[in-house]
Image (cartoon, rainbow, N blue to C red):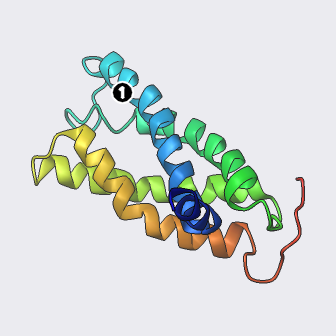
Amino acid sequence: MVKKLWNYFWKKRIFNFMFVGGVGYCVNMGIYYPLTLLIQNQVKFAGQVFYLPALLVSNPITIVFNYYLNKRLTYKDCKVMGFGLGKYMTVCMGTVLFDMAIIFGLVQYVHIYYLVAVVLAAVIMFGIRYWIVNKWIWNTQRNKEVVNV
């Protein structure tokens, strides 16, 4: 029963995307949190918002990691459309700006601890990223061949 359930979820692209996102989140936090501690007293960005600049370092690293993991696990049966990594970086870095706005709003106006706000922003942006990546990076509708780019 458990094996059947596992196989069912593993065959569903969205669950693979969630798995990769979860692993990527752990990688991101492994870079992001120590950076916030390092720059907390040295970086003044928008007053005392030390937690946002660290995202500009940790996210690009995580995005590259997630791209290759998604390519191997989530979209192994799909053709990459064009410059996959470049497009993936563009999409994800664009959504990072929305992440930063959400995090800033949650911390400054709702008074949520910044690490909790980072989690909430990732959850909020998950569906948007999944939809964009499916439509713009990997052609999940028309192409079903594996391409090693």
Residue lying at 23% horizontally and 44% vertically, measured from the top left: 116
Name the spot of residue 93 as percent of width and height, x first. 54, 52
**Is 41 above or below relative to 141?**
above
Please tell me which residue lies in front, 50 or 44.
50
Please tell me which residue lies in front, 92 or 13.
13
**Is 120 above or below relative to 23?**
below
Name the spot of residue 70 as percent of width and height, x first. 67, 53
Q: Residues within 10 Å of mark 1 (few under 14, many from 20)?
A: some
Q: In the image, 55: left or right of 59?
A: left
Name the spot of residue 133 as percent of width and height, x first. 62, 67
Residue with the most extreme bottom position: 142
Query: Which of the 4 image quadrants contains residue 11?
Result: bottom right
Query: Which of the 4 image quadrants contains residue 39?
Result: top left
Q: In the image, 1: left or right of 71?
A: left
Query: Which of the 4 image quadrants contains residue 77?
Result: bottom right
**Is 139 above or below relative to 106?**
below
Query: Dot 1 corresponds to which residue?
Result: 33
Name the spot of residue 88 as percent of width and height, x first. 66, 57
